[in-house]
Image: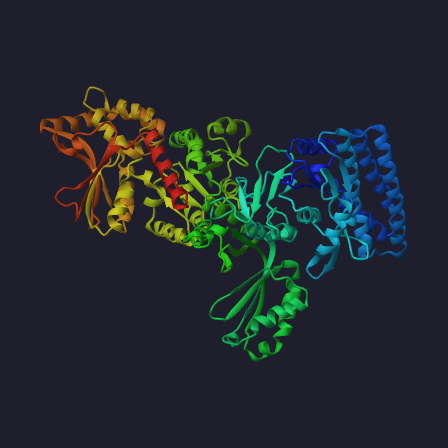
Amino acid sequence: MTKTDPWVVHKFGGSSVADADCFRRVAAILESLPGTRLGVVLSACRGVTDALLRLVALAERQDEGYRAELAQLRARHATIAEALLSADSARLYLAGFDRDVHDLEGILHSVKLTRAAARNVSDLIAGYGELWSTQLFQRFFAERAGRAGPVEWIDARRVVVAEWGPLGPGIQWPESRAQLAALVPADFTGTLIITGFVAADRRGVQTTLGRNGSDFSASIFGALLKASEIHIWTDVDGVLSADPRRVPDATVIDSLSYNEAMELAYFGAKVIHPQTMAPAVEDSIPIWIRNTFAPDKPGTLICAHPASRLPVKGITSIERVALVNLEGTGMIGVPGTAHRLFGALREEGISVILISQGSSEHSICCAIPQEQAERAVAVTRRAFERELAEGHIQSVDVDPDLAILAVVGDGMAGTPGVAAKVFSALGTSGVNVRAIAQGASERNISVVVEGRSATRALRSVHAGLYLSPHTLSIGVIGPGTVGRVFLEQLAAQSNRLREQFQLDLRLRGVMTSRRMLLGDPSIAPGEWRAGLESRGTAADLAAFVEHVRVDYLPHTVLVDCTASAAVAAHYADWLAAGIHVVTPNKQANSGALEYYRRLEQARRTGASHYLYEATVGAGLPIVHTLRDLRQTGDEVTSIEGIFSGTLAYLFNVYDGRTPFSQIVADARGRGYTEPDPRDDLSGTDVARKLIILGREMGLGLELADVKVGSLVPAELRAGSIEDFMRELPRYDSMMRGHLDAARARGKVLRYIGRLTAAGAASVGLTELPADHAFANIALTDNVVRFATRRYDQNPLIVQGPGAGPEVTAGGVFADLLRLAAYLGARL
């Protein structure tokens, strides 16, 4: 050994020593480590400590079943020993185990007779698990001879002296150092196998270090041995940024400061307990959290000065919390109110988790464990009985079923905008904040939220701080002509969006008019059709929406690719409930003005987003352009253009050589028309688009206000789509007459929509000069001209393809991505 060769302490938890294979894995890890001096602290085999405490409970109930359960513990350890040890070593180990069993039976018999076990008796029994696991492992590891030097067993009861006080076990360091020095020579080179969890008091009576005691043991021995590092081996890859059961995209934190780890641990994160770190913190010993089952992964480093530059390290929560609120005008400016409140709670033994008070001193509230809520209210009312009677304090209330969300990170100090991101994420996901607390260190922002919203809050804040992908729970209604292509585009881009922009577009449902497919956790966008056929169920819109909207996903969006008024009738309820809507369906925005205004109110009520760019011009930025003009203060005087890609196509192609009815049939086959071509030919579709734009301009237009020149013969306005398509050729001569008349005047036919700021709206077939801007466009182009105060002499023109499933689906997809950006995604 050289003078520079330090001790390194490794602690393995119960899951790491659960069975014979786990013992072999631990041995292999230790044999692969550098250095010549290892301290190895072991917990009891998984579940053994709880089983030992159950023996005590059975004996207290005078239940003889404790004998059978003790025999099961013996059988379990015998199985491990026989699998790992030589025959002679296993025999010797089990002989010692049987002596322990005999002693335990005597102790438990006494407990059975007295029907009560004192604390020191429970501690004595609970500590046998660590004795058994370490003695077994010491024999096994010594027989393997995989490391240089001796392998010695250290009974921590002969080293660690602990006295319990109000704050838990207090380590008596001088006595403990002296006892270790008596057992382990200063120049010892080899491996120490050390019992975790157990210690002794100054009288030599066995005690324990409490829950997480083996972690504490590792920290204690790290300090006693002046170790250079402590490694805590468990069954996770390190400290995670959130609970992976609730935030599946939680990531391993590369490094934490001691203070960050303590904050996260206090609020329930799976980190070693703050108290167990204290000896290591005192001596600035780095602590590694690593995975026994994936030893090649780096894990998480906890140290005084971590290298990680992430401002936020983790987000965690405490569940089943109640908020006690003391409120009254008599509290303002009166010293000692908080002292009396917290003194009363302390006397009752009630733990205060969080405190929040406004600067007005009108009220003070604190969060406590929910099971203590009734006692807390009662003791608070007794403490302020006089003030309540005299009206100086108006109320003492308790709100149950809450949760505390804590955002932790040293880097938040002095970093503007972190709190804004937290509250923005909570707001956009519809989570109401009941109370807020933040210390002057700025290391922790804590908020109290409804318990049922806790998972959604965790996920939204985790994504809002870019610790995991932004997740949108998506339901698609109407996978027809446009919906099918939208799903194809979603399938093609999902992986790229996740990898490049941390955006998780999670498809959870697809519904047709007859069937629906629900996915949990999701549906692969490219596999919805096969799934709908094989696993689909009868369509139920309410059940569909309920499935897509789950509490643990922060944002829900319904993509309606139908042309159904029945589906559009649900938008207001969805928006009011906080569900976002993206749609190319014109029914809602061009329906009754009263319903349109209800949509606006619902959106504000639910703090939701309603995006419908594809209702006008497919993928062209027509609605967006109009909104930008008005929001920047421009005055729109008129809008006119070709608003139907279908009708643009028909009159670009129609030259008289091919009958008009045949061109209509061809356009329908290409997906250029609405499912019922009469919606296009009647002018209704264009009229609806004018209504949508007019309402964007602030006009209170109804569909009946639009003068419509229909191209559907009166005799064909009723009847089925098939009847219409069959009978339409009878009217080809009428359309040929319009074409010939226009040509005779040197003009072309175009179907134009016009809208003025005064509310005059009309759509119809119009003759235009052959050199008119609207006369020379590509086949399915929409062209829209905005005349405004700014764009007066030279109107603003938006032009491009306005029909076809590809461009319409692209417009829907663009709205979906726009929504993701509104919700905080970095696109």
Residue 813, percent from left and from top: 38, 36
State the residue lying farthest toward the bottom: 390
Residue 680, percent from left and from top: 29, 33
Residue 193 vertical placement versus 431 (above, below): above
Q: Residue at x 16, y 42 (%)?
A: 795
| Residue 117 shown left or right of residue 1 in the figure | right
Q: Nearer the viewer, residue 509 or 342?
A: 342
Q: Nearer the viewer, residue 722 or 621?
A: 621
Q: Residue at x 41, y 38 (%)?
A: 560
Q: Nearer the viewer, residue 319 or 133?
A: 133
Residue 211, percent from left and from top: 70, 50
Q: Residue at x 85, y 50 (%)?
A: 59
State whether residue 711 appears in this view: no
Quadrant showing the C terminus:
top left
| Residue 756 shown left or right of residue 415 in the figure | left
State the residue lying farthest toward the left: 745
